[in-house]
Image (spheres, helix red, strand yellow):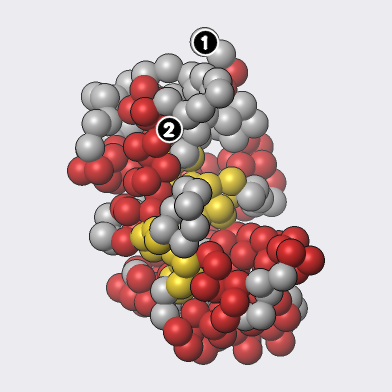
Amino acid sequence: MKASLAHEIRWPRVRTPTDAAHFIDSVGFCVLFPLTRIPLPSLYYASARRDIQLGPGWDKYCELIWKWKDELPLHRRAFYAKCLHGRGMFISRKLLPHFLAMRASAAAPGDHTRFYSAGRISADARAIWLALEEHGPLATLELRHACKMESTGSNVRFKRAMLELQCHLVLVHFGAEQETAAWPSSRFELTCRAFPREAAAARNISPDAARRAIARKYLAWHPNASPSLLARLFSWSKTEAAAACSAVPALRGRHRG
């Protein structure tokens, strides 16, 4: 099997948004497309049953899952953001509180001041957060205009700030909008407003408990994974990864747990 497919799982072919939501609920978290250096199952493989083959244009499976990354969060069936090493990842609603707790990101709408004062986000990221807090969900061009980053020269700043917020799980994809003649633009919302129950639940979960829950789900599908692999994947320390893995040895191999 190709390296990019080594961590795919056996699963009935995903054909509909409901199928996709069930897949994400079962695996707990997955990427959009197969990635060699990120050992997670992908929604693309679950739909196409093969490695991605990009030619002059996307195939029908690419088009399907590209829509689902915006539609599933809009209907609150799964979380999606570029939150894993700058790559897009789906997270099930059940595990979302644990990811928020793991990253100390159980934020309320007005927490931009706390994050900024602590040095966790830049001034540009804070401006984006403020715009969403004031205006609600916004598509990409609307958001750039609202935070005064609509010029060509500010595009890099905007993308960097958006990635900051997504890595902290502060933002989530939340539908799409046809802003130009090209592909529809993603719309974004604050995670705490899109998934308020999950954000509230995260405040009662310790980082240690969060890591154990995430490790439990990963090891259920990939029982031979080492603590060092989980440390690299989730940016944990070696000590944190070892503790999380040692707490769930009896669950290894029980992949629907």
Query: Is residue 115 depicted above or below 47 in this figure?
Result: below
State the mark number for residue 234: none
Left or right, 61 with respect to 75, comes to right
Local crowd size for mark 2, using a 10 Å CA cut-off: few (<14), some (14–19), many (≥20): many
In the orientation shown, which residue stands out farthest toward the top? 1
Q: Amino acid at mark 2?
A: Cys
Residue 114 in picture, x, y percent from top left: 62, 87
Q: Which residue is mark 2?
A: 62
Disc 2 secondary structure class: helix
Q: If the image is split into quadrants, where does the C terminus sit?
A: top left
- The residue sitting at 48% across, 52% down in the picture is 181
Residue 162 seen anywhere in this rendered image of the structure: yes
| Label 2 with label 1: CB-CB less than 8 Å | no
Q: Work out how far the residue at label 2 is from the one at label 1, CA to CA, in angstroms.
A: 21 Å
Q: Amino acid at mark 1?
A: Met
Nearer mark to the viewer, of 2 and 1: 2
State the mark number for residue 1: 1
Tell me which corner region of the image, top left, top right, bottom left or bottom right, holds residue 47: top left
Query: Is residue 139 depicted above or below 115 in this figure?
Result: above
Tell me which corner region of the image, top left, top right, bottom left or bottom right, holds residue 195: bottom left
Front-most of residues 48 and 153: 153
In the orientation shown, which residue stands out farthest toward the right? 153
Query: Is residue 41 depicted above or below 132 in this figure?
Result: above
Residue 198 in picture, x, y percent from top left: 35, 68
The tag earlier along the polypeptide, 2 or 1, is 1
Residue 107 in picture, x, y percent from top left: 49, 78
Left or right, 121 with respect to 10, comes to right
- The residue sitting at 55% across, 53% down in the picture is 82
Disc 1 secondary structure class: loop
Query: Is residue 64 depicted above or below 88 in this figure?
Result: above
- The residue sitting at 36% across, 71% down in the picture is 194
